Amino acid sequence: MERIKKAAMPIISLGVGLVLVFQAAVTFRLLCPPARFGWPQLVCEPAGWPFVHYPMYSLPHYPGETLNQYSVYGLLPNGREVMIQPQDLGLTVFQFPAVVEALLTEDRALIKTYVTAYHARVNRQLSGLRLENKAMVLGKDGWQDGKTEIIKQVEVD
């Protein structure tokens, strides 16, 4: 038993050391330098998870600051609307911001993909998607409801 411990200790130490070196390399973006340098980007987000794909500390918020809360609504051919949830598209909450980005940039090909996924999963045809921002404003007594505004509406065929 003592012999196995002596043999395993250097292997375990090497493994721990490699993980720490990799974490430092990903943290300081040594494996994902800015593209303008022309160096290869070996490990960029989200491939660096679980080492750095999350903020370790939140930035402070100050009174008067606005927090955007985007919601996506599907427009039905009969004029009704439904709120689109990540699971309606087969996405996680971490993947759902891509839907918001597609609407903001009006990426019609990607929007069509999401509409098709919604139809396949929920069995409802959509005639369009609408992006709303339900802002929250930090006041002296905490977060308060702000103004709700329609950011984008995209019709699909």
Image (cartoon, grey):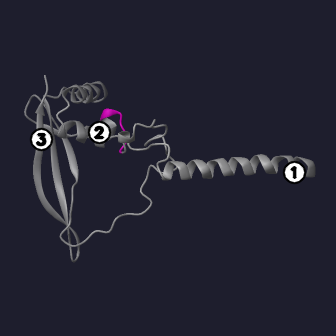
Task: Tell me where residue 20 appears, x and y as whole percent.
Answer: 61, 52
Q: Is residue 68 above or below residue 141?
A: above
Mark 3 secondary-structure assignment: strand
Q: Amino acid at mark 1?
A: Lys
The reply to whether the magenta stretch includes residue 42 is no
Q: Which mark is residue 17?
A: none
Q: Is residue 108 above or below residue 60?
A: above
- Residue that mark 3 sits on: 152
Magenta stretch secondary structure, dominant: loop
Q: Is residue 154 visible?
A: yes
Please state which of residues 28 and 103 is positioned toward the viewer in this rendering: 28
Task: Tell me where residue 54 appears, x and y as whole percent.
Answer: 43, 53
- Residue that mark 2 sits on: 98
Q: Give the residues in magenta.
A: 89-93
Going from the N terminus, do you reach mark 1 or mark 2 first? Answer: 1
Mark 2 burial class by Cα count in 10 Å: few <14, some 14-19, many 20+: some
Q: Is residue 51 left or right of residue 121?
A: right
